[in-house]
Amino acid sequence: MSTATLATIILIGGFFFLILLRVPITFALMVATLGSALVGGTNLTQMINSMVLGANNVALLAIPFFIIMGEIMSEGGMSEKIVALANLAVGRFRGGLAYVNIMDSMFFGGISGSAVADVSSLGSIVIPMMKKQGYSAEFAVGLTVTTACQGVLIPPSHNMVLYALAAGISAGGVLIGGLLPGILLGISLMVLCLFLSSHYDFPVGNSADYKGKKAKILLSAIAPMMIFVIIMGGIAAGIFTATESSAIACVYTFIITYFVFRSAKLRNFGHVLRRSLKTLAIVMTLIATAKAFAFMMTDLRIPEQITRALLGLTHNKYLLLLLINALLLLLGCFMDMAPLIMIMTPILLPVVTSPEIGMHPVHFGVMLIFNLAVGLCTPPVGSALYVGCAIGKTSLEKTSVAMLPMYLTMIVALMLVTFVPAISLWLPGLL
């Protein structure tokens, strides 16, 4: 066995072995990379330099701003205003609360950019409301979890920024490219709820009189929704970059939360910063170790070998894309989104941009994030699923069974995004 082969086995095999032992992903990446480098004779100075350069990137400044912005929104209870707006729009129909659940995730996802934040903030409001109206707890939790995946597609999404970093492309195009796929996912789930509402006779939504309340609800929701306008409008108009838009949106969120609505106490802002710092520390150490892992893969020519292996199976574009989707869906069941983005992008990007497939990097980025978003809802590692079950007090097994139609709906939407490039590329190309 050659030294390169042994180093490859240690890198890939060691990583998955440590994951099975439930070693934190950051440490699993670091240990596997270090072991492979020592066996393969790689220059450790170059490897460490790749870690430093991976974390020392101006584009990454968007991530802490997006994280702080999401924490401020959660602290200020902005989710209640979003739920009220969605309820005003669609709450009066049969199965109205199901539609409200989808719409508020669409709105809030365009503000927080986090599926877990969506589930924890909106789920604590909507899930009890749905249970009270007669929906099963498992359905309420399942719908909340799947609709939350819009948050990682619709801007702002720090996962899109991670992909842009790993792919070496502009973050603005990828952020905008996720808008229509996120909306498509929401519409697909609405169609599912329309069918289920007739089949299972869902309760008619609350027909409470909104007279005298409409103006107040709309005015209260305008300020939070302007965050989405600032980010999307600023990037699309070329007024500022994705990083600059994240900083401006963060400052705007701080002002409306603490000084306009006064829905949070300024003296508690330290807690917001501490929670944000904890999340940021996890993300940044993960980025650094994933960069070292990617450096070793490149040094061992693993992406080239995987490209040749996949192209050796078939040269059919559609079969290759189905294989890649199946691989990502499987990996998403066992690993979190951020490490998979940093690991799989340098492996699969050369495959999908090869002449046989010819996929645009923005299109692949949206497809990748969509695949891994499904992983947030699937056991055994789906973080959004665990949070939803905890809020709704349901079992993981029963909730997963209730979510089967929703999983199917997400796969159908994913296939549309995969095989219809215009869904991801039309808006970035237009703007």
Image: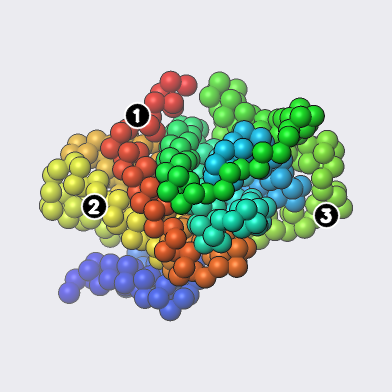
CA distance for labels 2 and 3: 48 Å
SS at mark 1? helix
Q: Residue at x 56, y 34 (%)?
A: 242
Residue denoted by label 3: 268
Residue nearest the observer in this picture, 285 or 128: 128
CA distance for labels 1 and 2: 21 Å
Residue nearest the observer in this picture, 304 or 104: 104
First in sequence: mark 1 vs mark 3? 3
CA distance for labels 1 and 3: 45 Å
Q: Residues within 10 Å of mark 1 (few under 14, many from 20)?
A: some
Residue 379 location (% of width, % of height): 43, 66
Q: Is residue 355 visible?
A: yes
- Amino acid at dot 3: Asn
Q: Residue at x 42, y 72 (%)?
A: 19
Q: Residues within 10 Å of mark 2 (few under 14, many from 20)?
A: some
Report the colour scheme.
rainbow
> What's the mark number on residue 323?
2
First in sequence: mark 1 vs mark 2? 2
> What's the mark number on residue 422?
1
Q: Is residue 302 above or below residue 158?
A: below
- Amino acid at dot 1: Ala
Q: Quadrant of the N terminus?
A: bottom left
- Amino acid at dot 2: Leu
Residue 384 location (% of width, % of height): 53, 58
SS at mark 3? helix
Residue 412 location (% of width, % of height): 33, 45
Q: Residue at x 80, y 52 (%)?
A: 269
